[in-house]
Image (cartoon, rainbow, N blue to C red):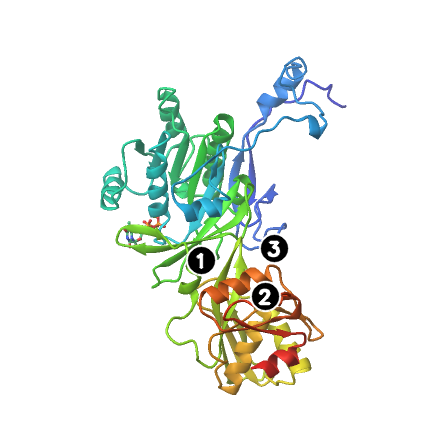
Amino acid sequence: MSRPSGAAKPARARTAYVCAECGAEHGKWQGQCAGCGAWNTLSEFVVEPAAKTAQAARRGGWAGRADAPRVTALKDVRHTEQARVSTGIGELDRVLGGGLVEGAVVLVGGDPGIGKSTLLLQAVARMATTLPALYVTGEESLAQVAGRAARLDLPLDGLQALAETGVETILAHVAGMAAGARPRLIVADSVQTLWTESLTAAPGSVSQVRESAARLVRYAKETGTAVFLVGHVTKEGGIAGPRVLEHMVDAVLYFEGESGSRFRVLRAFKNRFGAVNELGVFAMGDKGLKEVPNPSAIFLSGGSTRQPGSCVMVTREGTRPLLVEVQALVDSSPLSNPRRVAVGLEQNRLAMLLAVLHRHGGVVVGDQDVFVNVVGGIRVQETAADLPVLLAVLSSLRDAPLPEKTIAFGEVGLSGEIRPVPNGEERLREAATHGFKRAIVPRANAPKAGALKGLEVIAVERLADALAAV
Ligand code: TYD
Ligand code: MG
């Protein structure tokens, strides 16, 4: 017998199993996630009933209200340009897309010790001089935070701090503040230490992290408060525990760097208010993180680049060109299936490029191990790296350095053609600015009228032309 509508059983909390990789929900525990195929990623999660909305709808609560949702022509929707606040750190503003947007929730991920707390403390202290801000720490004591701030000579006048991990307590503290002092910016360091009373799971578990973050996201959207969440990255590279956090927030920034190097790269991985792939570059020193506004020079290996197996390229990450060095090592392989290893580049693309090199360049590397690396721990995702990779491979194979002060960029097609890449002139200007004398580039990227001062441009159409040029 069917139940009359409106007399449904009262909703009760139920248990679901959520995958930490893809966020898929399952009714019961299983070893492998049916959504993404990952193993041992499901953990228990209590789902609260959606009682309030359902009841409100039953009482006809929505229909009569002025703010009831209704279908609207999009052109009639009033909108304002999102207000952005500068963080006081130019490189951070750049990665955020030109400053922090009101009500935005930004997740900053990175390995432990990379400098997330330092960066956010520097940013929030500067922002606190113009708007009320709160730094919530769950990992360090207030004395530690104050000590670091003093060592970094940060202005501390407007900045409030709280050592607390319970989300409800944090929000109660905020609600208890006088309206004028209520923070417009909250930093939660880190999201892994947060927990909410509504769940019994242990702090740090997937469900706690997800639900605590959800509370803060809700608060941010309701009040227009900007929130920075700090998240530690696991060995696998995702934010520890829930990948699901990435869907909930407006922007995900990753803070990366090579161990042993003092340079750090902040990269937008997702951004609802700006471009992804934008890079911010910092150097860690004894006074905290300093911006590196002109990062090209640091990604060259320094010293002489006239080594066999090295080629400098101009990549364009986000909105600015960047000189980086691609290195290759080609060595005869004892294996029947020689190795192809790419660090900072895509592995499959390397295999494809080597095939093109063989077929259209007549260069045999089938019996050689090939290792390719981008110096400085940076990742190059664009196809402009194709030509430099092949030139570096050839240079290593022949054990002969490329001509001095030479850069290259260009996409290599499967039929051996060299294809143009966006913003060729801007890349060439960057190379000229840094004193390079020769550029091997796709024909369509060569400047049409006049040459750049001091830079000889060698325009190539086919892979064979490029190989002949070196
Ligand atoms: P931290 O911001 O605590 O890292 P995270 O929050 O990502 O775990 O950074 C700690 C590291 O930075 C630590 O190894 C020391 C180094 N550091 C400096 O070199 N100089 C400084 O001025 C500061 C504050 C930290
Ligand atoms: Mg920290």
Contact check, label 2 and label 1, Cβ < 8 Å: no
Q: Is residue 89 above or below residue 424?
A: above
Disc 2 CB within 8 Å of nearest ligand 1 atom: no
- Report whether 445 appears left or right of 1: left
On the image, which quarter does residue 179 sit in? top left
| Helix, strand or loop at mark 2 | helix
Q: Name which residue type carries label 3.
A: Gly
Answer whether residue 338 is visible to the viewer in this image. yes
| Quarter of the image with the N terminus in it | top right
Circle 3 residue: 37
In the rendered structure, are the residues bearing label 2 and label 3 in contact, judged by CB atoms less than 8 Å apart?
no
Q: Height in image: 368 above or below 202?
A: below
Point out residue 294 in the picture as x, y percentages from the top left corner.
Answer: 42, 57
Tell me which amino acid carries mark 2.
Answer: Ala
Camera-side residue: 195 or 343?
A: 343
In the rendered image, is residue 232 in sight?
no
Asked if marks 3 and 1 touch (Cβ < 8 Å), the reply is no
Task: Point out the residue furthest to the right here.
Answer: 1
Q: Secondary structure at mark 3?
A: loop
In percent of width and height, residue 86 lies at 43, 39
Quadrant where the C terminus lies? bottom right
Q: Tell us which disc is closer to us: 3 or 1.
A: 1
